[in-house]
Amino acid sequence: MKAILTDPKVYIFILSLMIVGAGAIFAVDRLIMPVYTNHSEGVTVPDVTHMSIEEAEETLLAHGFRFEIEGSRAHEAFPADYVVDQSPEGENLVKPNRRIYLTINDAESEMIEVPDLSNLSLRNAEIQLRNKGLRVGNINYESERFQNTVLEQSVAAGREVNRGATIDLVISDGLGGRLIQMPEIEGLRLSEAQAELQNSDLMVGAIQFQERADVEPNIVLSYSPTDQDSIREGTEINLVVSEQPADEDDEVEEGVIVDTTDVDPDTLDIDDQ
């Protein structure tokens, strides 16, 4: 036994076996398995969610895939028989002829009448759509004098769409394209100044009150901006308006002390004695 352990040929044999085994593993991993599994061939899985089952079938077959409906579940944001999930997911690289498992929406979506959103503020439009079970989609802005007001909607009011559908909106940015001649509002009463600004397609901004004893209340003392004669429609004009100074507290009169030292006692009332 000792002679075997000290024989160099034994160690050479063991080392040879290890080298051969390592080479076999490398060959299987790098050469045989890639050929067997078509490792060098791969196809990107198309994303078929948000498609009807007919569209999904056509798309998958065109890309060389098979498919199987794995299950179904209700999803209010999709019409009935639309794909709501898939496995493997879209954009994954897989072998050709791979089977794609689909989950479809099995619930009949409720039809919702689209509300009229024109001239509503963006916030009110979002609330209206949410209350109806609809959602705001893309928001684009156009120049108009009234800020954050709905100018257009992608689906006309009164049309019926599936619950969960998205409605795209066009919103005004509050800056119109026309230049307006700034009206002379200094010295006008506040109500008159507001009417002048509204008639000129301008907006009343912040109103600051300033105490002035020499000017009657609610008179426009100044406004801003004042550095330009022409101003873009929809611009906010800030006003400084007069108000009556606060009344000063009446001074408290101190009690008067009457000196009765020299007064004739006979002239005093009985209560004073």
Image (spheres, rainbow, N blue to C red):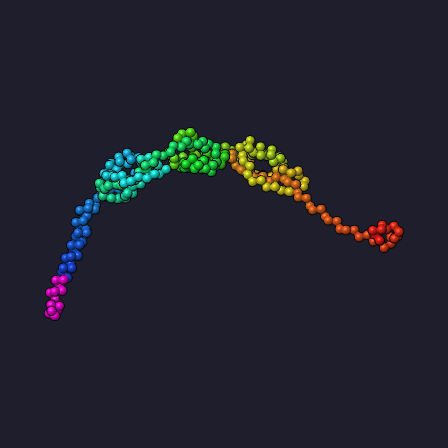
Tell me which residue sits at (68%, 44%) in the image.
Answer: 247
Res 32 visible: yes
Image coordinates of residue 26 in percent, x first then y, are 18, 54
- Please report the bounds of the magenta region as a residue range: 1-14
Q: Main secondary structure of the magenta part?
A: helix
Q: Residue at x 14, y 62 (%)?
A: 14
Say left or right for 270 vs 102: right
Say if 30 sits above or below 164 in the image. Answer: below
Image quadrant in which you'd find residue 243: top right
Horizontal arrangement in the rendering, residue 27 relative to residue 240 (left or right): left
To which quarter of the image does residue 142 belong? top left
Find residue 116 and report its horizontal and vertical position in percent.
Answer: 45, 31
Q: Which residue is more in the foreground, 164 or 116? A: 164
Q: Quadrant of residue 211?
A: top right
How far from the left and from the top, in percent, is residue 180? Answer: 53, 33
Task: Residue 221: say if magenta.
Answer: no
Q: Quadrant of the N terminus?
A: bottom left
- Quick one: 124 or 68, which is closer to the camera? 68
Q: Is residue 133 left or right of residue 219?
A: left
Residue found 14% across the figure and 57% down from its top = 20
Q: Toward the viewer: 45 or 266?
A: 266
Residue at horizontal 40 percent and vertical 29 percent from the top: 159
